[in-house]
Image (cartoon, rainbow, N blue to C red):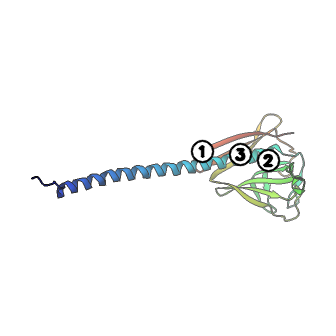
Amino acid sequence: MSRPRAFTLVELLVALALFAIVSAFAYRGLTSLLEARESLDREARLWRDVALLVGRIERDVRATLDRRATGPSGTTLAPVSSLVDLGGTTARGLAITRSGAPLHANPLAAPQRIAYRLDGSRIERLSWPAPDAAPRALPEPVPVFDGAKALAFRFLDAQGAWRDEWGMPGSNDKLPAAVEMTLELTTGDKIVRLVDVTR
C-alpha cells in the first residue's frame, strides 16, 4: 500500500525561490508602470497649463484698446508696452490697456490695464482697477503659470520690422501690428506664439 508523497524540503525551497524571483520582476514592472503614469500625468498637466496661459495672453492682446494710460508714477503709458510700470520700479514684460469683459454689466466691463511678467520661474498677471492708476497704486498679481525659464515679447511695427522694445516712456508708439510671445520652459521646451493686434 503506497503512502501519499509530500514535498521535500528542497522542493519547497526551490518553489519559494522561484516565487520570490517572479514577484521581484512583477514588482519592478509595476513600479515602472506607475512611474510612467505619473510622468505622463505631470506632462499632461504642464501642457494644459501652457495652453491656458497662451490662450489667456491671446485673449488679452486681442482685446487691446488704442488708449493711453497713466502709470502709478504718473507716467503716460502707451496702449501696449514692453515695460511694466510698478510705481517706482519697472519690469520687463507685456503691459496693455484692454477692454473689459463684455459679458459683465458691471465695473469689470470698464477698460483695464493688465500686464504679464516673469518672477523667478513663475509668470504673473498683474491687473489695475483702471487704465489710469492712482498714485502709488499697486497691481494685484495673480500667478498664472509655474515652470518658466524665460518669457520674452517682440512687436511688429507698421514697416514690418520686429522690435524687442515697444511703448517706452517718451515714445509715440501706439499699437503694434502683432505681438510675438516666446516662452521657454524649465524642461527646455520653447513655445513661440504670434498674435495679431485688433485695430
Instruction: Give the CA distance from mark 3 to mark 2.
Output: 10 Å
Badge 1 local density, few (<14 within 10 Å), some, or many (20+)? few
SS at badge 2: helix
Q: Residue at x 44, y 50 (%)?
A: 32
Type of amino acid under label 1: Asp
Q: Nearer the viewer, residue 198 or 77?
A: 198
Mark closest to the chain's N terminus, 1 or 3:
3
Q: Nearer the viewer, residue 110 or 86?
A: 110
How many numbered marks have been drawn onto this rendered protein structure? 3
Which mark is drawn over residue 60?
A: 2
Determine whether label 1 and label 3 are within 8 Å by CB.
Answer: no
Q: Residue at x 54, y 47 (%)?
A: 40
Type of amino acid under label 3: Val
User: Which residue lies most toward the front here?
Assistant: 1
Quadrant placement of the C terminus: top right
Which mark is drawn over residue 54?
A: 3
Determine whether label 1 and label 2 are within 8 Å by CB.
Answer: no
Which mark is drawn over residue 189?
A: 1
Residue 148, placed above or below residue 72: above
SS at badge 3: helix
Mark closest to the chain's N terminus, 3 or 2:
3
